[in-house]
Image (cartoon, coloured by chain):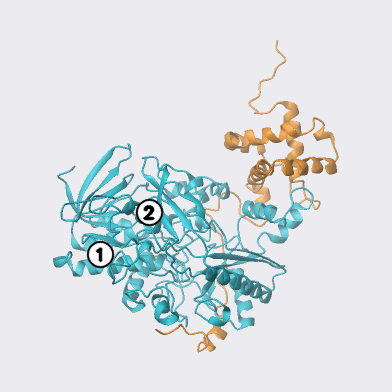
């Protein structure tokens, strides 16, 4: 009997481990516990929908990182990613965009920053009308704020 | 098809094409509009999905070169300080516009008389006033009457909510004694004409799934079609043909399958705006018009005007709910709109208060500006900025200069092989001084409003929404392309109704004035049907 368990994950186990460390380094959990880390959102699901574009970009990052990246301290991981961001700023920025895109689509994250869950339509948002009496100085001073007569 | 002759053929189904089709439908003539793009489906718009922000980086990008739909045409911006942004489809750029809807001011039509620069328009604000009002009713415009910076006007709907962003900046303007007013917005604040009101979704520039934003696919077009106008999508016009008498007699176009077709017409109306219209005219060469159709003046494609744009953002300690509400529509200030030569430049600018972005754009903008890091510190910096910002867009008047042009690119083409437009554009010293002044005043306003951190940028590159002046109107055929009611000086059955006919650009978003001009031209055509070509 084979001991190989099939997986549809685009990365092998060591790569997955490194990717998780990358995600946790880019967006760690907040100290107050209100914001999860980027590994706590469903990044695998994100890759299933955006993988065609995101996978080669992420792969390029993983190839440049040390095999021991996941075991390193936070400071060391930050230093490695900083070095990569300076060596290939465009690819780094694109990967960061994907990480933030996945992160800020997560309902826990959205609620924590004061947004509604899920798509903004059709629920929408409430916005206060505002105090139109603030216009009184403009109206009372309208002689100074007249359109230019032709 | 060559025996089939339509009475009026309109090219382009955007802001002006929809308006002119709607108005001419009164005549019961056979009217056909050709649009190179498709209808868009609101149920597929970005805000119906969780990834609405990132969709604006791709399929709903405002830049056609990035968006890259086969219904778009690529644009060569390499020699331009501003990149063109637009949308091609039924509704045109109103699908993605911010719907900020101020009118040009009376003084904008008379800049030579008043300030000794550029040229006066051959028409004035009073001529257009009834058409501004008509357009406000059909589009559904929200606003507040009584603004002393305009002649009296009455928007059909009450203003959009100012929200905390509007109130905060209003207090700042009041401290300085400056003018401000709730913006006229082509967004409905109440149910109107079968449409439900704005839901304050936020990202109007990614199209409006609710239909609260007044794009012409849901305002003018349903009524125009009901009254008999035929709208053909996926028809990309390559050129307008002329007969031996020098009249336009039809168009060569490509259908959805890329097949070359021909449609005859008695009257041709151009409504492709300030880049698309000169592109087709310049591509319509013949023995009679070797330099392009209607171009005996040599003015087709010249005098391209954008609006130089600056941006001032303030971060506030208090939460402003910045991501909620129409992003581009809140309040405005006209304090520096009219000329004051002591400032070191002529004409002026509009200060347009805009709300904040969603979280992805906030985080990425923070990364590129160095204000929101990745890694440790991300959340703290993000919290200080997300929903805590307000911005001021500085929209300045751009005076016409012949060296700012739309020409045909010699290599780049669209998917049907039609030459792409090439933009050659640089800012004038006047524009640069104006933006510098606006950025400084914007900073002042932010300080007065209580911002704790202020960033400024401008003039900005990806802001080429307002495409004006490339087939300008005028009384002199030597220096203008169309007459005072949009008819070509050279081709008596060819009309232009879009932003390319602007003589000067004012300092405001032009959609309202473009549509008022289109309605005025259509009305004048109707009044002169018996002798339209005299």
Q: Position of residue B429 (x, y in %)?
A: 54, 69
Q: Colour of chain A?
A: orange
User: In the image, B52: left or right of B249?
Assistant: right
Residue nearer the viewer, B3 or B90: B3
Q: Horizontal placement of A83 versus A126: left or right? A: right
- Is the residue at mark 1 from the same chain as the one at mark 2? yes
Residue at point 80%, 34% (across, down): A70
Q: CA distance from mark 1 to mark 2?
A: 19 Å
Q: Which corner quadrant of the image does residue A103 belong to?
A: top right
Residue at 77% from the left image edge and 42% from the top image edge: A83
Question: If you read the primary sequence from the N terminus, does the residue marked by circle 1 or circle 2 appear first?
Answer: 2
Q: Which residue is mark 2?
A: B276
Q: x and y percent of residue B73 in the render?
A: 42, 46
Q: Is residue B243 left or right of residue B440?
A: left
**Residue carrying label 1:** B489
Mark yes or no: residue B415 visible. yes
Callout 1 secondary element:
loop
Quadrant (top left/top right/bottom left/bottom right) for the N terminus of chain B: top left
Q: Is residue B216 above or below residue B5?
A: below
Q: Chain of mark 2?
A: B
Depicted B438 relative to depicted B59: above or below = below
The chain under label 1 reads: B
Q: Residue furthest top?
A: A1
- From this view, report whether residue A133 is shown above or below residue A2: below
């Amino acid at each position: 009997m084979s001991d190989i368990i099939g997986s549809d994950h685009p990365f092998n186990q060591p790569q997955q481990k490194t990717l998780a460390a990358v995600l946790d380094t880019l967006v760690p959990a907040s100290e107050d516990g209100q914001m999860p880390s980027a590994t706590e959102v469903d990044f695998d699901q994100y890759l299933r929908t955006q993988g065609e574009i995101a996978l080669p970009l992420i792969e390029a990052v993983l190839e440049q990182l040390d095999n021991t990246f996941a075991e390193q301290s936070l400071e060391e991981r930050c230093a490695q990613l900083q070095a990569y961001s300076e060596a290939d700023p465009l690819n780094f920025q694109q990967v960061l965009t994907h990480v933030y895109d996945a992160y800020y689509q997560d309902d826990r994250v959205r609620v924590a920053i004061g947004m509604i869950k899920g798509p903004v339509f059709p629920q929408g948002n409430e916005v206060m009308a505002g105090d139109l009496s603030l216009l009184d100085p403009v109206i009372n001073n309208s002689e100074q704020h007249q359109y230019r007569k032709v | 098809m060559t025996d089939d002759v339509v009475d009026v053929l309109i090219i382009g189904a955007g802001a002006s094409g929809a308006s002119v089709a709607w108005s001419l439908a009164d005549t019961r003539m056979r009217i056909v509009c050709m649009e190179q793009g498709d209808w868009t489906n609101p149920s597929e718009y970005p805000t119906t999905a969780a990834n609405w922000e990132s969709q604006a980086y791709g399929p709903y990008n405002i830049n056609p070169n990035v968006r890259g739909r086969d219904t778009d045409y690529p644009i060569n911006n390499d020699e331009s300080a501003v990149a063109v942004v637009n949308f091609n489809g039924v509704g045109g750029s109103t699908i993605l516009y911010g719907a900020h809807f101020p009118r040009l001011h009376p003084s904008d039509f008379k800049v030579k008389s008043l300030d000794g620069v550029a040229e006066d328009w051959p028409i004035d604000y009073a001529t257009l006033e009834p058409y501004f009002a008509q357009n406000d009713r059909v589009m559904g415009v929200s606003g507040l009457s009584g603004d002393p910076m305009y002649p009296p006007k009455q928007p059909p709907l009450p203003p959009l909510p100012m929200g905390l962003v509007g109130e905060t900046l209003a207090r700042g303007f009041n401290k300085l004694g400056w003018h401000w007013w709730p913006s006229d917005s082509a967004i409905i604040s109440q149910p109107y004409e079968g449409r439900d009101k704005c839901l304050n979704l936020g990202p109007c520039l990614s199209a409006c799934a609710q239909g609260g934003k007044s794009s012409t696919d849901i305002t003018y077009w349903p009524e125009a079609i009901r009254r008999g106008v035929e709208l053909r999508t996926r028809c990309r016009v390559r050129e307008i043909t002329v007969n031996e008498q020098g009249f336009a007699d039809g168009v060569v176009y490509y259908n959805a399958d890329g097949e070359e077709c021909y449609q005859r017409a008695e009257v041709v109306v151009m409504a492709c705006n300030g880049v698309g219209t000169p592109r087709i005219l310049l591509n319509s060469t013949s023995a009679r018009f070797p330099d392009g159709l209607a171009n005996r003046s040599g003015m087709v494609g010249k005098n391209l005007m954008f609006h130089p744009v600056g941006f001032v953002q303030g971060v506030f300690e208090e939460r402003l709910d910045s991501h909620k509400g129409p992003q581009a529509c809140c309040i405005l200030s006209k304090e520096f709109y009219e000329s004051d030569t002591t400032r070191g430049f002529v004409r002026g600018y509009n200060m347009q208060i805009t709300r904040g972005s969603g979280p992805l754009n906030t985080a990425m903008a923070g990364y590129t500006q160095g204000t929101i890091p990745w890694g440790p510190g991300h959340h703290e910096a993000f919290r200080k900025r997300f929903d805590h910002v307000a911005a001021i867009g500085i929209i300045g008047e751009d005076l016409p200069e012949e060296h700012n042009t739309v020409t045909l690119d010699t290599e780049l083409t669209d998917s049907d092989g039609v030459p792409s437009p090439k933009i050659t554009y640089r800012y004038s010293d006047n524009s640069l001084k104006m933006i510098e002044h606006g950025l400084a005043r914007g900073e002042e306003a932010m300080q007065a409003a209580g911002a704790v951190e202020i960033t400024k940028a401008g003039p900005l590159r990806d802001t080429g929404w307002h495409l004006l002046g490339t087939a300008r109107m005028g009384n002199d055929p030597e220096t203008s392309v169309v007459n005072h009611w949009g008819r070509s000086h050279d081709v008596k059955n060819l009309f232009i109704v879009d932003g390319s006919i602007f003589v000067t650009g004012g300092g405001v978003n032009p959609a309202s004035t473009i549509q008022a001009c289109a309605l005025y031209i259509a009305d004048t055509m109707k009044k002169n049907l018996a002798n339209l070509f005299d």
